[in-house]
Image (cartoon, grey):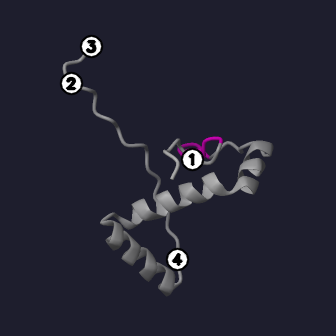
């Protein structure tokens, strides 16, 4: 058994680029400031909440086999996201 716990490695990241209406981008920036977090964190957590709460999407995911992603790209796990505590 190690003397100290192993370092938790962050999950692999994939860069995405999207364009948002100015008002939405401003709200994202303000919400990140409010949470004292990054915009990346806010987008990620918001999407995870949406994936978790959307029952129709969950049913679709269960009924629709995932297409293998192109080499070098990660697929979305069944259920839409990694396990997170429910909020």
Task: Determine the secondary structure under disc 1.
Answer: loop
The mark nearer the N terminus, 2 or 1, is 2
| Nearest to N terminus: mark 2 or mark 4 | 2
Q: Residue furthest bottom?
A: 22
Q: Is residue 17 above or below residue 3?
A: below
Q: Which-is-in-front pick, marks 4 and 3? A: 3
Labels 4 and 3 touching (C-beta < 8 A): no
Badge number at residue 54:
none
> Residue 75 is drawn in which quadrant?
top right
Circle 2 or circle 4, nearest the eye: 2
CA–CA distance in space, label 4 to label 1: 23 Å
Q: Is residue 60 left or right of residue 73?
A: right
Q: Which residue is mark 4?
A: 19
- Residue bearing the label numbered 3: 1
Q: Residue at x 30, y 66 (%)?
A: 36
Tell me which numbered mark, 4 or 3, is placed earlier along the sequence: 3
Asked which secondary structure carries label 4, the reply is loop
The image's mark for residue 81 is 1
Contact, CB < 8 Å: mark 2 with mark 1? no
Quarter of the rendering occupied by the N terminus: top left
Left or right: 81, with 78 as reference point: left
Pick the front one: 25 or 36: 36
Q: Find residue 31 and report its image quarter.
A: bottom left
Q: How much space separates mark 2 and mark 1, taking CA atoms?
A: 29 Å
Residue with the mark numbered 2? 4
């Amino acid at each position: 058994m190690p003397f100290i716990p192993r370092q938790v490695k962050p999950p692999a990241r994939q860069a995405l680029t999207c364009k948002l209406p100015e008002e939405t981008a401003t709200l994202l920036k303000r919400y990140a400031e409010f949470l004292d977090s990054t915009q990346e964190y806010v987008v990620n957590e918001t999407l995870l909440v949406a994936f978790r709460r959307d029952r129709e999407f969950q049913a679709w995911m269960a009924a629709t086999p995932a297409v293998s992603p192109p080499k070098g790209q990660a697929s979305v796990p069944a259920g839409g996201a990694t396990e997170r505590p429910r909020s």
